[in-house]
């Protein structure tokens, strides 16, 4: 439980105005119309200001980064970092961008407008949305009381650290399976606050760990993040909604991928087709269409990833791991493993990298 004085201190830190926010606020007061819809770049925004009678010659460059694509390298300096948090600049013009990572937009106080292509949604205090990689999006808030934070999570973090979330039977686990394996068609998942809860406390813990500690602990950050998602499942599940309608066809790639993962040692395409009542040809085409990979390549990736987890977390002999994940040919397992990780299973076990 966060102490009262720590909570107050953290919220005060969040409410502080950055220099960029002050500049944006002045521009918003002078020309609010320039902020109504997302921009594709700083020059477009300067043109809007000019059209609105505001000259911004001195602002050749944006006061804060406005980029069309945000990479993991921009937020993570070290390889072992998994979680970052960034406060959304108040009054910053909404700018279209895509991500290489997973982002959770959470409204600590006030409100914001969240844009995706064709969608404009107002999110209020306690609301949040999960944004997958590759989705064009923008966020805008224009009140001094607004505190909107972006929790940045490496895509690989879910695969290696949050396996328990993937095993849950919930809309969130379905969504994460789709996000990790689906080739395209990523969607934003909204959660509306339904009751008083502790999710804000976990967000404050993450923010405090990254902004108040001399050396942020990656273990602590992932623990707070797990609690954050746990609270989300407890209090937010009933009020979920997608930003777009699901395909009405009875084909749920998340269910198919989960079944493959749970039965990776024995599953075959014929068994999978029988289980989900599709023909082998149709199922094979749809898996490739949805994930960008043929069935056998997707299955190989699942088996090798599971082998990597077992190598890191157990002392089980390599030959037993080989059999446990579904390989009958040890030499083939070694070949596939080295192709995936650039080293033998024994070398991988010694390094502890995953």
Image (cartoon, rainbow, N blue to C red):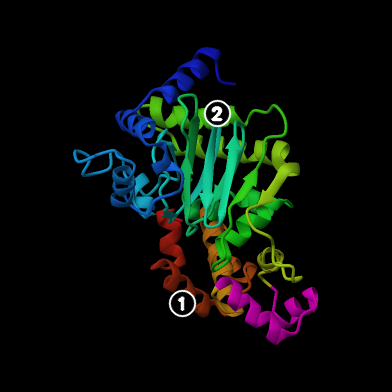
In depth, the one of 332 and 267 nearer the eye is: 267
Residue receiving disc 2: 110
Q: Nearer the viewer, mark 1 or mark 2?
A: 2
Query: Is residue 214 something that shows in the picture?
Result: yes
Badge 2: residue crowd in 10 Å (few <14, some 14–19, many ≥20): some
Provide residue 130's location: percent of width, then percent of height.
Answer: 57, 48
Q: How far apart are marks 1 and 2 (CA)?
A: 54 Å
Q: Picture coordinates of residue 202 (x, y %)?
A: 57, 31
- Choose between 293 and 51: the one closer to the eye: 51
- Quadrant housing residue 236: top right
**Which quadrant would residue 89 be assigned to in this image?**
top left
Measured as percent of width and height from the top left, residue 231 is found at: 66, 36
Judged left or right of residue 132, residue 264 is: right
Residue 79 shown left or right of residue 146 in the figure: left
Give the residue displayed 62% in from the left and 71% down from the top. Answer: 323
In the picture, the quarter occupied by the N terminus is top right
Q: Residues within 10 Å of mark 1 (few under 14, many from 20)?
A: some
Image position, residue 31 (x, y; %): 37, 36
Q: Does 275 appear in magenta?
A: yes
Q: What element carries label 1?
A: helix
- Residue 176's place in the image compared with 211, above or below, is below
Q: Which of marks 1 and 2 is nearer the N terminus?
A: 2
Residue under the point 47% across and 56% down = 136
Prevailing secondary structure of the magenta residues: helix
In the image, farthest residue toward the top:
5
Q: Which residue is drawn at 46% across and 43% down?
A: 36
Return the residue at label 1.
335
- Locate residue 284 relative to residue 15 in the image: left or right: right
Stretch of the chain drawn in magenta? 266-291
Q: Where 218 sits versus 342, above or below?
A: above
For the residues labelled 1 and 2, say whether their Cβ atoms are less than 8 Å apart.
Answer: no
């Amino acid at each position: 439980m966060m102490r009262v004085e720590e909570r107050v201190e953290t919220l005060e830190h969040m409410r502080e105005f950055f220099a960029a926010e002050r500049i944006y606020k002045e521009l918003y007061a002078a020309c609010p119309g320039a902020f109504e819809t997302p921009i594709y770049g700083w020059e477009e925004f300067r043109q809007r200001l000019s059209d609105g009678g505001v000259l911004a010659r001195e602002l050749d460059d944006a006061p804060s980064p406005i980029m069309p694509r945000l990479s993991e390298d921009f937020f993570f300096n070290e390889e072992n970092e998994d979680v970052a948090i960034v406060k959304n600049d108040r009054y910053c013009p909404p700018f279209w961008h895509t991500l290489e990572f997973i982002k959770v937009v959470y409204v600590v106080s006030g409100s914001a407008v969240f844009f995706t292509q064709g969608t404009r949604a107002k999110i209020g205090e306690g609301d949040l949305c999960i944004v997958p990689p590759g989705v064009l999006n923008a966020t805008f808030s224009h009140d001094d009381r607004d505190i909107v934070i972006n929790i940045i999570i490496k895509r690989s973090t879910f695969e290696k650290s949050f396996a328990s979330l993937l095993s849950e039977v919930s809309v969130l686990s379905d969504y994460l399976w789709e996000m990790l394996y689906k080739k395209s068609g990523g969607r934003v998942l909204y959660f509306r606050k339904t009751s008083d809860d502790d999710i804000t406390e976990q967000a404050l813990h993450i923010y405090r760990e990254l902004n108040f500690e001399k050396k942020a602990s990656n273990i602590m950050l992932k623990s707070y993040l797990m609690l954050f998602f746990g609270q989300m499942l407890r209090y937010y599940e009933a009020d979920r909604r997608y930003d777009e309608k699901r395909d009405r066809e009875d084909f749920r790639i998340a269910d198919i991928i989960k079944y493959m993962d749970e039965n990776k040692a024995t599953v075959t395409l014929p068994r999978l087709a029988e289980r989900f009542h599709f023909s082998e040809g149709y199922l094979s085409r749809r898996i490739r269409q949805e994930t960008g990979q043929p069935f056998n390549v997707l299955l190989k990736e699942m088996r090798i990833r599971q082998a990597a987890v077992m190598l890191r977390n157990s002392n089980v002999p390599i030959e037993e791991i080989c059999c446990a994940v579904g390989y009958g040919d040890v030499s083939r397992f070694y070949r596939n493993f080295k192709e995936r990780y650039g080293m033998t299973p024994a070398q991988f076990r010694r390094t502890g990298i995953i």
